[in-house]
Amino acid sequence: MAIIPKKSTDFTVVRRSDFPIRLTLKDSNSDAVNLNGYTVAGEVYNEDRSTKYADWTIAYTNRVNGIVDVSLSDDQTTTFTPNIVFYDFKYTQPDGTEFVYLRGKLFMLEGYSA
């Protein structure tokens, strides 16, 4: 079964703070997909993709159960100077076929400490 992409999801992020997300990739039966042989990648960029701000850190927490932890560090979120940035995640199947899994906006709030 194929992995079912998520709909666009927006998040609010505080500058100068870490921002983790746990992804669980599932198929059309809502069963976790065994991610052995798969890769996941993600980027943060401006609206027209002319500037890339960061790559997400990817940790394969439990490949058999489709769980991937992705995160941005406090140092990375400091560099997100627009108040709205965009992100996406893609996964690559063992045969090299790529699909977008999740995308959306990150609404940036100013952190309280520098």
Image: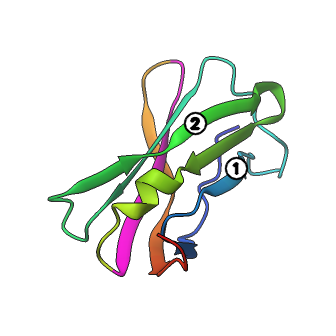
Callout 2 amino acid: Ile
Give the image location of residue 78, x and y in percent: 40, 62
Label located before the other in sequence (1 or 2): 1
Front residue of 112/17: it is 112
Q: Main secondary structure of the magenta part?
A: strand
**Residue 51 at what x, y percent from top left?**
19, 57
Quarter holding residue 67: top right
Left or right: where 101 falls relative to 49: right
- Identified at 69% across, 30% down, the residue is 60
Q: Secondary structure at mark 1?
A: strand
Packing grade of label 2 (10 A; few <14, some 14-19, many >=20) is: some
Q: Which residues are magenta?
A: 83-94
Which color scheme does this rendered protein use? rainbow
Residue topped by disc 1: 23
- Residue wearing tag 2: 58
Measuring 47% from the left and 72% from the top, which residue is drawn there?
Answer: 106
Residue at the image point whose x is 57% and y is 36% from the top: 58
